[in-house]
Image (spheres, grey):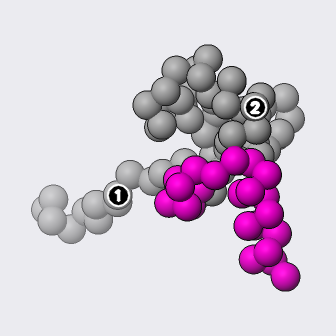
Amino acid sequence: MLDTIPIRPATEPLVVNANALAKLLGKSLRTIRTLDAAGKLPVPLRIGGSVVWRVNEINEWLAAGAPSRAVWVARIASRQK
């Protein structure tokens, strides 16, 4: 009987808050706040009163070598032309 129940993989969240981002990157919350303030993370989204980052963008940013926010924004802008 159990073989008829479809098994669904755990879904990854679309966005994460600073606490979850810290865990994802293996950093402290304080480090995440410092990196964000220094412009070293991708631009977060503000949804209501929450500040969150897109998981897919964080993955792409890491794959690109974690460039500064300014460089990252420029890369994104050049892709959209």
Question: What residue is at 15 percent from the left and 59 percent from the top?
Answer: 2
Question: What residue is at 21 percent from the left and 68 percent from the top?
Answer: 4
Frontmost residue, 25 versus 16: 25
Question: What residue is at 47 percent from the left and 37 percent from the top?
Answer: 24
* Quadrant assignment, res 75: bottom right
Quarter the C terminus occupies: bottom right
What stretch of residues is rendered in magenta?
60-81
* Residue 35 picture location, percent across and down: 67, 31
* Residue 29 picture location, percent across and down: 58, 20
Residue 62 forms part of the magenta stretch: yes
Question: What residue is at 75 percent from the left and 31 percent from the top?
Answer: 38
Q: Is residue 50 left or right of residue 26?
A: right
The image's mark for residue 38 is 2
* Kind of residue at badge 2: Ala
Quarter the N terminus occupies: bottom left
* Quadrant assignment, res 33: top right
Frontmost residue, 59 versus 54: 59
* Quadrant assignment, res 41: top right
The residue at which mark 1 appears reads as 9
Between circles 2 and 1, the one closer to the viewer is: 2
Up/down of 68 relative to 72, above or below? above
* Residue 46 picture location, percent across and down: 83, 39
